[in-house]
Amino acid sequence: MLTLTSPIETYAHRIPASVKMAAFVALTVLLFATPQPWLLAPPVAALILSCGPKFALQSLKNLRPLIPLILILALWHLWLRDPLGITLITRMIIGVAAANFVTMTSKLTEMTRTVETFARPFSPIIAPKTLALAIGLTIRFIPTMLMRAEQITESWRARSPKRPGWRIFLPTTLAALDDATHTAEALRARGGLG
Amino acid sequence: MTTPQGITLTNASVTLGGKSILSNLCLTLTEPRIGIIGRNGSGKTTLLRLIAGLIPPTSGAVTIDGLNPTDRKALLPRLGILFQNPDHQILFPTVAEELAFGLRQQGQTEAAAAAAVTHLLSQESRAHWAKALTHTLSQGQRHYLCLLSILLMQPETILLDEPFAGLDLPTQIRLARRLAALPQRLITITHDPEAVALCDRVLWLDQGQIRADGPPGPTLQAFTAEMAKLGEQDADTHLPD
Amino acid sequence: MTTPQGITLTNASVTLGGKSILSNLCLTLTEPRIGIIGRNGSGKTTLLRLIAGLIPPTSGAVTIDGLNPTDRKALLPRLGILFQNPDHQILFPTVAEELAFGLRQQGQTEAAAAAAVTHLLSQESRAHWAKALTHTLSQGQRHYLCLLSILLMQPETILLDEPFAGLDLPTQIRLARRLAALPQRLITITHDPEAVALCDRVLWLDQGQIRADGPPGPTLQAFTAEMAKLGEQDADTHLPD
Amino acid sequence: MEKNLTHIALFAALIAVLGLVPKIDLAAGVPITAQSMGIMLCGTVLGAKRGALAVLLFLVVGLIVPVFPGFVTTWQKIQSPSIGYIIGFPIAAFVAGLITQNTKLALFPAAFAGAILGGIVVMYAFGIPGMAIMLGKPLPDMALASAAFLPGDLIKATLAALITKSIAQMRPEALLSRS
Ligand SMILES: Nc1ncnc2c1ncn2[C@@H]1O[C@H](COP(=O)(O)OP(=O)(O)OP(=O)(O)O)[C@@H](O)[C@H]1O
Ligand SMILES: Nc1ncnc2c1ncn2[C@@H]1O[C@H](COP(=O)(O)OP(=O)(O)OP(=O)(O)O)[C@@H](O)[C@H]1O
Ligand SMILES: O=C(O)CCCC[C@@H]1SC[C@@H]2NC(=O)N[C@@H]21
Ligand SMILES: [Mg+2]
Ligand SMILES: [Mg+2]
């Protein structure tokens, strides 16, 4: 599934998502305010380690997407002989590790609900219920579009010796637009937004 | 003042993409069991969407118990719709969420909706469906799920677009029995005359117009005779644009 | 050495999402008219996808005229597939493009493909369909379009998944007549015993296994009796997970 | 109303799906991604307001699930040199939509102009200062570094305009920017 939520249940899963998100925002502010972001590394590392070795290992693995970025920034700053690179990279690693901690220990529904709560001040612009529905629809449309692409590839392969490649982009987009139209009708048929 | 009960169409027409699909329909539908039959492309699904307020009439008017069908909120307890293609109806990734959504929309609490869903599924001996992913169900299973989700909401009128197509025989037999026992008004759309033989009233839709309207006996007889005649020909020699 | 003709399954099993859908099927399909019947969710569509090489067997093997079905190039002239849901088959925005696609893939020139499409549509008195947008056709019309696009390619074996569901009676009658006249091998998947009554061989698929296999007479009789019995019960008391 | 909502959600999802196309990492730490085409499409197909809302929705969903290339969330992106671009995303879509819906040009040139002005000019106007601040480097250097995006972005703008035109032909009712 499309989620980073860790299947390893820890005490941190039971802390409300709102608390974790607020703490994360505070940490980010600190990270950018201080010229010595590495001072924040020990508490964040301790937090992750306190959830057990298996969880910590998973956290480490989830940092993998950062590797190319870190390498590039490191090489670039080495070439420039600019020590700022160290600050940049530590800040990024700590920030991303903390962000992952929040997503790994919070359930999708709970995070949606928290975002809904935080968005309450905007309720004159968008009703919290509508926002929650929009978030849910988006999360659903992502695999649906991929499934559409698969179905279209399958139908293509059933009639063609060649793989479709990029040619599926337009049919998939059109099919997805039709899906959105049908979803709108299905929503209306069961009471709609109101 | 009494508001008119049932579904009324007054000179209702629908034009889509510059093509006239339904023309000048005048109908008052009040019978408890109504069948609408017609060929592919005759406008059955368009008529359903018009009645359900999913598309507005290009001209003329539609009312349901005196209300405008585009007022979905007022209509929710009055009208339920089974779509012809289950993929066009299913909104949620799991069976339980799909079933619960309608009840939540009707104002039930999350707990009440969940309980109703569990009860329904166990009644259907399909408790193991609750957590099943809707997109992995077979086509017939998805179709049946859509039906269950409408029946669960207990609307006063249920519009069914080809409710039996794609269902296997035991499910068809059970469904027919179950539908027959419902106190609600049912409007069944189909191309299969057998499916509406027990209705109080059958309408035959042909190229967007009512070709016949009355008790099932004579209407279906005329329909079946015409269909057999057309089937003998090698192609539709006179299809309009 | 002669290569085996027809479709063979050797101990073929399919597991999807951790669930066993087809188990240990051993079949040799060579008859010109084969029917596959079964309940919703029995695995009919999965079997079709397996035979067509759209999914690989989890274990065991499948061959078509001795070839591996994943070899699309060799298979194209041998196998055509009608998908159960037209929405899963239609690729192009207009009817003419949809019909021409298969012919182009078989190596015909654009002009030849266009001519074949025009000829076919006028033969069907549906010349006005050529420029129609596929997504505005009615469900039955889309279904029929999918059928036409497969027939146009004239593959040696045609796999049809519920070819009659959703088609109106005249179209069904004509289609049946047309299919009967085809020299190709047809494998028809359906839940409706009538649709396969004239086959040479009928297979009854039940929970991913062959429950019966033989001439239509006895197989369909047993199937219909079982279905009627199940229909009398109020629910499937013993559905597996 | 429901149609607006589902189309906005669909385009938010489309940006996420484009995030599955492999990115190309560049020196300054901001990658070349296919997602910027998604931003352009939001504007040119949905129009200014809905397009911007779709991008905002994408960013909000990104707080909950990973929607950026390499399975990355919005939380992480706002820590990276990309932050300026991320802030520019909704505004870029808004401008692209504004131009598409308000010029008297034919759809293709209008969408192309919108994609260039919104998806490139406005986008870089936010992105370059963002890089300068995050990386502590002078603006001109960063502007120069961003030139590496130009060829790709020009191709993406052309594709976005073509797709917009195709949608107008094949699903005219879905082209909310001009309805
Ligand atoms: N958006 C549209 N633009 C143009 N024509 C349309 C549109 N929607 C439907 N039609 C046409 O309207 C006619 C009626 O379609 P409808 O779906 O109501 O038929 P139906 O009676 O439900 O058929 P079926 O039995 O195949 O489901 C068809 O000829 C179809 O091509
Ligand atoms: N990806 C999947 N993951 C899990 N289960 C699946 C998956 N695909 C199919 N199934 C299950 O496999 C079974 C067989 O599905 P299949 O579509 O082959 O049935 P079918 O015989 O064609 O039914 P129908 O008559 O309704 O079309 C169903 O119970 C379905 O839920
Ligand atoms: O970090 C990311 O994942 C995306 C940041 C934005 C990348 C910008 S968008 C405009 C420009 N064109 C690209 O291809 N990349 C940058
Ligand atoms: Mg219909
Ligand atoms: Mg099937």
Image (tube, coloured by chain):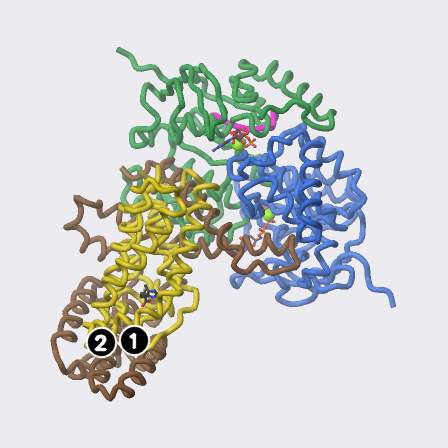
Chain colours: A brown, B green, C blue, D yellow
Disc 2 residue crowd, few under 14, some 14–19, many 20+, Cα 10 Å: many
**Can you see residue A134?**
no
- Where are the magenta residues, as a range? B187-193
**Can you see residue A27?**
yes
Q: Chain of mark 2?
A: D
Specify the quadrant that holds the C terminus of chain A: top left
Residue C181's x, y, as percent? 80, 38
Residue at 67% across, 31% down? C171
Residue at 38% across, 70% down? D70
Quadrant of the rendered image containing residue D69: bottom left
Disc 1 residue crowd, few under 14, some 14–19, many 20+, Cα 10 Å: many
Verify CB contact (< 8 Å) between mark 1 and mark 2: yes
Residue A45's x, y, as percent? 23, 81
As drawn, the label of residue D28 is 1
C-alpha gap between disc 1 and disc 2: 8 Å
Vertical relation: A24 (above or below) B132: below
Queried whether the magenta region covers residue B142, the answer comes back as no
Vertical relation: C233 (above or below) C205: above
Mark 1: amino acid: Ala
Residue D54's x, y, as percent? 31, 51
Instruction: Judge by depth and name the residue closer to the eye, D123 or A147.
Output: D123
* Left or right: A168 in relation to A97: right
Q: Chain of mark 1?
A: D
Quadrant of the rendered image containing residue C236: top right
Label 2 belongs to which residue? D135
Specify the quadrant that holds the N terminus of chain A: bottom left
Closer to the chain start, of discs 1 and 2, is 1
